[in-house]
Image (tube, grey):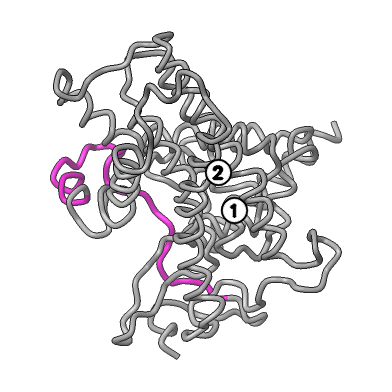
């Protein structure tokens, strides 16, 4: 099997990559400026393959697939429908591409698939008794709806001059800098929100819906309770507090709306037609779905490492997690 080059199967058939989860050489001590600069322009790196894609899709969505800002001054149902359809098409094409390649075509079978089982089809755990149908329903009925409503609300503030809106030609450097920093903000926001919804009351109320996907697939990415969707997409509310361009809002929401797909794909690598394969960086978040209390961010910022919730997939990390959970249980008893 081709996967033997990159990982092994345990006794239960679960795929374990040889590569350990790690962070780029940016927030390290002592500093490594040359390594950091090389990572920024490398593939994979800060821009490629993911971040530049989300930025470009976000820019196209605002400048070519959205009405002018004036249209948001008095929102209409027609405006909502147009934006909902735009966002739905983006999700359908992107999430659907991963699902079609890995779960419908199945040309690579279970090669590089972490969990050897396929998504559940006959279980009372999921709505309609089907994991994928449940996830697709939550993605569009709640996820894309809340994404669209938040987008309209924030741009309503901008269109009615309740916040300061910049012009690109007057603030080129500021515009470019903010766009390039969106991923850092998303990392920080996601970690904070994710830790919050793992608080027991919120977990029982909302986040348990997402964690029904212990064997995640692409459509698991946005399968959340409406309350979690509100918190998750609240990343775009940041721009209400300082001058911004509407594109910032759209790019941030596109980033939040599309980026869960590869992280939830359930595979470490996707095979190409020529027999090669590419790493889609899904292992860190798969470990979160498997062990629950680790890898809350799995992004560029080493927040899990700083706060002791990092799991790199090794036996040592597994042991540390067990000890941490044991200590947590003892504190509850005391």
Q: Secondary structure at mark 2?
A: loop
Say the numbered circle drawn on residue 148.
Answer: none
In this rendering, position of residue 276 left or right of residue 11: left
Q: Position of residue 111 (x, y in %)?
A: 49, 82
Residue depicted at x 49% and y 42% = 82
Q: What residue is drawn where x is 59% and y is 60%?
A: 219
Give the residue number, with chain letter if any, for mark 1: 288
Percent across and percent down for residue 209 are 73, 49
Image side of residue 285 versus residue 243, left or right: right
Magenta residues?
15-39
Residue closer to the observer: 15 or 141: 141
Residue 87 magenta-highlighted: no
Query: Which label belongs to residue 296?
Result: 2
- Magenta stretch, main secondary structure class: loop
Mark 2 or mark 1, which is nearer the start of the sequence?
A: 1
Q: Are marks 1 and 2 in contact (CB under 8 Å)?
A: yes
Above or below residue 95? Residue 105 is: below
* Residue 167, placed above or below residue 32: above
In-image side of 77 versus 188 (left or right)? right
User: Label 1 crowding class (10 Å Cα cut-off): few <14, some 14-19, many 20+?
Assistant: many
| Residue at 41% over, 74% down | 270
Q: Which residue is drawn at the image coordinates 15% and 25% (left, top)?
A: 172
In the displayed structure, 100 sits above or below 194; it is: below
Looking at the figure, which quarter contains the N terminus? bottom left
Within 10 angstroms of label 2, few (less than 14), some, or many (20 or more) residues? many
* Quarter of the figure that contains the C terminus: top right
Q: Locate residue 181: give its quadrant.
A: top left
């Amino acid at each position: 099997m081709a996967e033997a080059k990159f990982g092994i199967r345990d006794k239960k058939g679960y795929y374990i990559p040889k590569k350990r989860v790690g962070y780029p050489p940016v927030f390290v001590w002592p500093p490594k400026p040359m390594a950091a600069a090389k990572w920024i322009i490398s593939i994979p790196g800060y821009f490629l393959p993911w971040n530049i894609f989300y930025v470009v899709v976000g820019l196209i969505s605002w400048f070519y697939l959205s009405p002018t800002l004036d249209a948001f001054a008095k929102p209409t149902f027609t405006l909502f429908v147009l934006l909902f359809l735009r966002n739905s098409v983006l999700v359908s094409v992107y999430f659907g591409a991963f699902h079609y390649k890995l779960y419908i075509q199945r040309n690579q079978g279970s090669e590089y698939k972490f969990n050897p089982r396929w998504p559940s089809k006959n279980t009372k755990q999921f709505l309609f008794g089907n994991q994928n149908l449940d996830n697709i329903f939550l993605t569009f009925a709640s996820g894309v709806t809340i994404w669209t409503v938040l987008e309209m609300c924030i741009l309503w503030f901008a269109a009615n001059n309740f916040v300061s809106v910049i012009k690109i030609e007057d603030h080129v450097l500021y515009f470019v800098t903010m766009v390039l920093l969106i991923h850092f903000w998303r990392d920080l926001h996601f970690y904070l929100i994710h830790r919050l919804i793992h608080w027991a009351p919120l977990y029982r109320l909302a986040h348990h819906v997402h964690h029904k996907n212990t064997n995640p697939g692409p459509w698991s990415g946005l399968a959340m309770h409406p309350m979690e969707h509100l918190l998750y997409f609240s990343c775009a509310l940041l721009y209400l507090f300082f001058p911004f361009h509407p594109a910032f809002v759209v790019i941030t929401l596109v980033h939040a709306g599309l980026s869960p797909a590869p992280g939830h794909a359930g595979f470490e690598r996707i095979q190409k037609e020529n027999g090669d394969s590419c790493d889609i960086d899904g292992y860190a978040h798969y470990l979160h779905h498997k062990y629950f209390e680790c890898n809350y961010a799995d992004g560029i910022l080493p927040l899990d490492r700083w706060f002791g919730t990092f799991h790199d997939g090794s036996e040592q990390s597994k042991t540390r997690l067990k000890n941490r959970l044991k200590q947590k249980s003892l504190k509850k008893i005391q």
